[in-house]
């Protein structure tokens, strides 16, 4: 019984410690960054010169101009799904980025994933900076904090990864995936009925 009480107290203290940077009275978010519903009005569509919606070639050019990403032309992969490509880059030890991934669908960038170097920054600093700039996250869990508006989902995931997602492109992929799954299930059912 005592062990359970101690465990619950520790869990509550940990949850309070994690939530303090964004939800403390001392540093409320700037009201102008969110609309009345609390949705951030303007979220970044990427980092540096690389933004969601860019073409494959434009991203390659931008990566070549930014040494922190550690990009080389050999880092391009073609995925099994049609019209899907991936660029992976590995930063050097002193770079802010350990690795980064740029996902494309139909020739446009729709997900940017940046694994940050813990020797150069930490989760608390990045989380605090995002809260200060974009307000409280729309969802918060021990695994990740998420800010979103109508066009972009920005997440900070543990241990130390930033992710930018184009909502419209991602929703379209999900809908196409669900339709393909449904067609496969119907085909399988017709096969079973024909036995």
Image: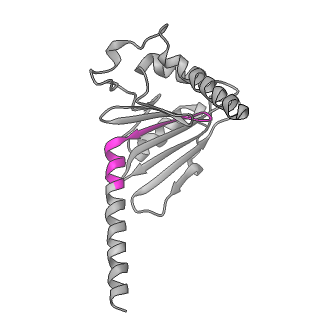
Q: Position of residue 115 (x, y in %)?
A: 59, 37
Q: Tally the marks.
A: 0
Q: Which residue is nearer to you in this view: 33 or 61?
A: 33
Classify residue 6 as left or right of residue 152: right
Residue located at (33% from left, 87% from top): 193
Q: Which residues lie in the magenta part?
A: 157-174
Left of 172 or right of it: where is 84? right
Q: Give the residue displayed 34% in from the left and 61% down from the top.
A: 178
- Image quarter hosting the C terminus: bottom left
Instruction: Tell which of 21 and 96 is nearer to you.
Output: 21
Q: Is residue 112 above or below residue 83?
A: above
Residue 175 coordinates in the image, percent (x, y): 31, 56
Q: Residue furthest front?
A: 1
Whether 165 is among the magenta residues is yes
Q: Is residue 53 above or below residue 9?
A: below
Q: Name the residue: 31% across, 64% down.
A: 179
Q: Is residue 103 magenta?
A: no
In the rendered view, does 123 fall on the left or right side of 171?
A: right
């Amino acid at each position: 019984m005592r062990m359970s009480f101690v465990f619950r107290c520790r869990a509550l203290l940990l949850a309070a410690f994690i939530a303090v940077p964004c939800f403390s009275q001392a540093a409320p978010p700037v009201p102008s960054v969110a609309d009345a519903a609390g949705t951030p009005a303007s979220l970044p569509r990427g980092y540096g010169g690389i933004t969601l919606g860019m073409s494959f070639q434009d991203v390659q050019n931008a990566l070549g101009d930014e040494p922190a990403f550690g990009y080389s032309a050999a880092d391009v992969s073609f995925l099994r799904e049609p019209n899907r490509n991936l660029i992976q880059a590995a930063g050097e030890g002193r770079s802010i980025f350990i690795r980064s991934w740029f996902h494309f669908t139909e020739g446009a960038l729709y997900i940017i994933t940046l694994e940050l170097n813990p020797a150069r920054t930490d989760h608390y600093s990045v989380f605090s900076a995002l809260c200060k700039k974009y307000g409280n996250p729309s969802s918060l869990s021990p695994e990740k904090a998420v800010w979103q508006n109508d066009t972009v989902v920005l997440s900070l995931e543990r241990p130390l990864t930033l992710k930018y997602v184009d909502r419209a492109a991602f929703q379209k992929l999900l809908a196409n995936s669900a339709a393909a799954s449904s067609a496969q299930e119907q085909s399988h059912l017709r096969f079973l009925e024909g036995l």
